[in-house]
């Protein structure tokens, strides 16, 4: 692999790690802020808008 | 070596079908809902599934990430959707658009529809190129901006994409619930007719243009495409082995040139190109299978 290929591969790995960490941090913040209750409340009731009669 | 064998024998085609069917059943495993017309209310609905799967489908066991995103953004007072966005990012980085190619039940439906033996329509290059941006407009406008900023008297907002566009909601939620509940049926009006029309357009589109909805309209596909360049599941094209036969482009459901646009935003990582390649130049590039990780 040439230098450019190595640099590009390194960039891919860095982006991957960055977004994995960011995703995990966001999820944790959401869980601490009990955002999942909004998701649950929406998901356990029939969403009239979603089915086209709301 | 094993990967090459897998590609040449076309075995991955069977594996892909098994994955797609298992995934559709896994995300929609509440069979009782299809009998009694009630949706599942258990705790698994805390979790967003990675695919476009309406949470008002009587069989759905999880929450639709696009619906959840709009629900959080549309909450009175406004909230940043950390939880939903975080989960979507994790799915995006780990699976990328393999979610579209291998897991999405609506993608499976489009694959089945495309098997109807009619002459497929080839969208002219420029129009095709422009239409592919529509999904990003839908994501930005209908999923994010309108639910976040276009509030009603209560300070909340409606899920704009679900309400006015989503054909998956009509198919998976609307039709079965209206069939099973006479009370809901009496409420169906012009909005339901509009959504049925959009569903008809989507179904017809998928018959004539492979992966019509994924290609042009899906906001979830648009989101995952942002991770295509660095997702953990990727494809690999060995240009030195490529004999330029064009078979990969012929079978590609997204109508791209897999060799040129490998791991591009439009590649849904379905692996059909690898199946079709006579010189095994295209294969999955999973970190556990790479040469470097084997050493």
Image (tube, coloured by chain):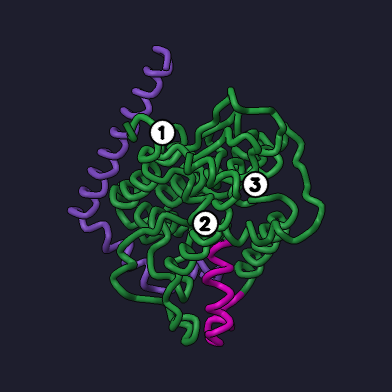
What is the CA distance from the residue labelled 2 to the residue labelled 3?
A: 17 Å
Mark 3 or 1 closer to N-term?
Answer: 1
Judging from the image, mark 3 belongs to the subunit labelled: B
Q: Position of residue A42 (x, y in %)?
A: 36, 66
Residue indicated by mark 3: B253
Q: Position of residue B66 (x, y in %)?
A: 44, 54
Q: Which mark is residue B230?
A: 1
Judging from the image, mark 2 belongs to the subunit labelled: B
Residue lying at 77% horizontally and 42% vertically, measured from the top left: B122
Q: Is residue B67 left or right of residue A10?
A: right
Q: Secondary structure at mark 3?
A: loop
Q: Which mark is residue B102?
A: none
Q: Position of residue B85 (x, y in %)?
A: 34, 47
Q: Which mark is residue B15?
A: 2
Q: Secondary structure at mark 1?
A: loop
- Does residue B260 show up? yes
Chain letter of the purple region: A
**Secondary structure mostly seen in the magenta stretch:** helix
What is the CA distance from the residue labelled 3 to the residue labelled 1?
A: 22 Å
Residue at the outermost left position? A32
What is the CA distance from the residue labelled 2 to the residue labelled 1?
A: 24 Å
Magenta segment includes B86: no
Q: Nearer the viewer, residue B115 or B153?
A: B115
Judge if badges 3 and 1 mark residues of a common chain.
Answer: yes
| Colour chain B appears in | green
Q: Which of the two discs, 2 and 3, sits closer to the camera?
A: 2
Task: Look at the image and give the residue range highlighted in magenta.
Answer: B167-188
Judge if badges 2 and 3 mark residues of a common chain.
Answer: yes
Judging from the image, mark 1 belongs to the subunit labelled: B
Mark 2 or 1 closer to N-term?
Answer: 2
């Amino acid at each position: 692999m040439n230098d450019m290929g190595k640099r590009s591969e390194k960039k891919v790995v860095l982006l991957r790690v960055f977004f994995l960490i960011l995703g995990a941090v966001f999820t944790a913040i959401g869980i601490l802020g009990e955002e999942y209750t909004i998701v649950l409340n929406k998901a356990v009731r029939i969403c009239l808008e979603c089915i086209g009669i709301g | 070596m094993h990967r090459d064998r897998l590609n040449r024998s076309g075995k991955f085609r069977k594996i892909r079908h098994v994955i797609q069917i298992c995934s559709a059943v896994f995300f929609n495993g509440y069979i009782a809902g299809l009998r009694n017309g009630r949706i599942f209310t258990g705790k698994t609905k805390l979790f967003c599934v990675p695919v476009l799967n309406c949470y008002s489908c009587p069989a759905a066991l999880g929450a639709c990430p696009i619906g959840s995103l709009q629900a959080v953004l549309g909450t009175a007072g406004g909230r940043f959707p950390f939880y939903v966005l975080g989960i979507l990012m994790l799915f995006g980085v780990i699976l990328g658009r393999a979610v579209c190619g291998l897991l999405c039940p609506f993608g499976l439906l489009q694959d089945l529809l495309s098997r109807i033996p009619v002459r497929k329509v080839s969208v002219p290059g420029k129009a095709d190129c422009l239409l592919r941006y529509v999904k990003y407009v839908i994501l930005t406008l209908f999923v994010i901006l309108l639910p976040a900023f276009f509030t009603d008297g209560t300070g909340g907002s409606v899920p704009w994409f679900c309400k006015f566009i989503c054909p998956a909601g009509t198919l998976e939620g609307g039709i079965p619930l209206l069939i099973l509940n006479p009370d809901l049926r009496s409420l169906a009006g012009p909005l339901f007719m509009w959504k049925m029309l959009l569903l008809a357009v989507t179904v017809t589109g998928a018959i004539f243009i492979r992966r019509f909805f994924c290609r042009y309209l899906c906001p979830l596909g648009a989101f995952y495409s942002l991770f295509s360049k660095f997702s953990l599941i990727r494809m690999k094209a060995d240009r030195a082995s490529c004999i330029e036969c064009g078979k990969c482009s012929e079978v590609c459901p997204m109508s791209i040139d897999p060799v040129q646009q490998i791991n591009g935003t439009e590649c849904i990582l379905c692996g059909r190109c690898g199946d079709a390649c006579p010189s095994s130049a295209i294969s999955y590039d999973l970190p556990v299978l790479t040469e470097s990780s084997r050493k």
